[in-house]
Amino acid sequence: PVGNHWVLSERDIPSDVPELENYEIVLWGPEMVSEWLGNAILRGDLVAKPPQHANESENKSLPIKEINQVRPTTIRSKIDFSTWITQRGLDGTKSTPVLLEARLWGVEGNLIGPDGQNESHSWSLFEDPWSLNLELLDESKSTQNTPELRIIKPEQTMWMAEERLQSEAERILEVRRKEDPIIGDIKGPVRSMLLRKWALNSQTASFVSNPAYIPGWILQLPDKSKILHGSNGRLYDIP
């Protein structure tokens, strides 16, 4: 019919498609479709889930087993891909959405107070090997609906060594609390507001690594292909 049309093709579209009068036709080949879908998934506009194939006959005969399996966590992109590309004059650059491998550390341990007090806690720390960073996970900025995309692994040397991991965890998880001790002097008791340190005992804490990912894109730049980091907006070489 006459009017506007949007055609999605599973096959490559020839370059010599004739123009038709009274028709406004937009043609997308498989590369544009996959790019659009990948960007929509990374933004969270679409949720991609693997198909579930249930066999009713097997379900009736086999007992159901509970399996404790940690679902991978993916942080949400902090950059707008289209804006980032436009601001750098890279419109038209071919891109492929990917996931950058990271780690989510489940930490269980004790905070030791200034007078030997002992408090048990648990935390989630997100390790980004690409930017060499460790931080507390903001669960409002992450999702467990991880899309099925190509996963890019960092170089092994980019991961934190155990000693540095413990040191960084101590720094991040240290807290200072207001206390109101009474200090005696010649004129009588005086109240002094103090901030006293509660520190993680990293030697007795447990660190459990779980899968995590950062959204990213492979950009086919004129000189060489690069990885665009979806959290800090920086470019990295492909390992």
Image (cartoon, rainbow, N blue to C red):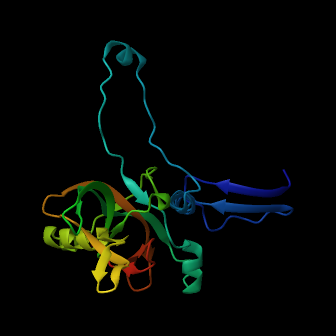
Residue shown at 54% from the left, 72% from the top: 81
Residue 53: x %, y % from top left: 43, 30
Q: Position of residue 140 (x, y in %)?
A: 49, 59
Residue situated furthest top in the rendering: 61
Closest to the observer, 158 or 221: 158
Quadrant housing residue 32: bottom right
Please name whichever residue, 18 or 119, is drawn nearer the observer in this view of the structure. Answer: 119
In the rendered view of the protein, which quadrant contains the C terminus?
bottom left
Which of the 4 quarters of the picture holds residue 122? bottom left
Q: Residue at x 48, y 70 (%)?
A: 95
Q: Is residue 162 left or right of residue 6?
A: left
Above or below, 153 against 65 in this view is below
Q: Quadrant of residue 45?
A: bottom right
Viewer-nearest residue: 11 or 67: 67
Does residue 160 show up?
Answer: no
Number of marks in picture? 0
Q: Is residue 88 visible?
A: yes
Residue 175 point in image, percent of width and height: 32, 70
Q: Residue 12: image x %, image y %?
A: 55, 59
Q: Is residue 5 left or right of residue 193?
A: right
Say if 204 sits above or below 157 in the image.
above
Q: Is residue 82 left or right of residue 49?
A: right
Q: Is residue 76 above or below residue 62?
A: below
Residue displayed at 32% across by 58% down: 123
